[in-house]
Amino acid sequence: MIDKFEEQLHQDLHQFLQSMKEIDARLPECPDVEEKWEQIAKAYIPDGIREFNDFPSASLGWMMYIGMAAMQLNRKGYYMTKMN
């Protein structure tokens, strides 16, 4: 059930951002962050789901912000060192 929700959310968000001309059709790939994503998501999901009904934009925005932070830390070489 969570997998279906995640896939649908991914598709909807991708389509929305494309329609706003905020992203390209091809999504970037980052396998080293994807390997740690489950650990990061487990820490966030309980709060994100609880707040989603009242604050859907904020809940999704926080998750995107976490993703951006992970990518920035990965660029600096910090992320993989600290998460291992």
Image: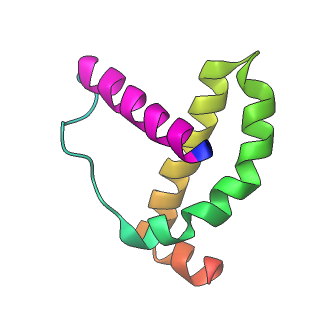
Which corner quadrant of the image does residue 47 belong to?
top right
Residue 12 in the image: state x and y as whole percent.
40, 26
Residue 61 in the image: state x and y as whole percent.
57, 31
5 lies left or right of 55:
left
71 lies left or right of 79:
left
Does residue 47 sit above or below 72 in this rendering?
above
* Residue 14, magenta (yes or no): yes
Q: What is the chief secondary structure element of the magenta stretch?
A: helix
Does residue 36 sit above or below 43 in this rendering?
below
- Please name the residue shown 71% across and 25% down the image: 52
User: How many numbered tags mark residues here?
Assistant: 0
Residue 17 in the image: state x and y as whole percent.
33, 26
Does residue 50 sit above or below 44 in this rendering?
above
- Please name the residue shown 81% across and 31% down the image: 50
- Please name the residue shown 54% across and 47% down the image: 3
Residue 5 in the image: state x and y as whole percent.
55, 36
Query: Where are the magenta residues, as a range?
Result: 3-19
The quadrant of the rendering that contains the C terminus is bottom right
- Please name the residue shown 25% across and 26% down the image: 18
* Residue 6, magenta (yes or no): yes
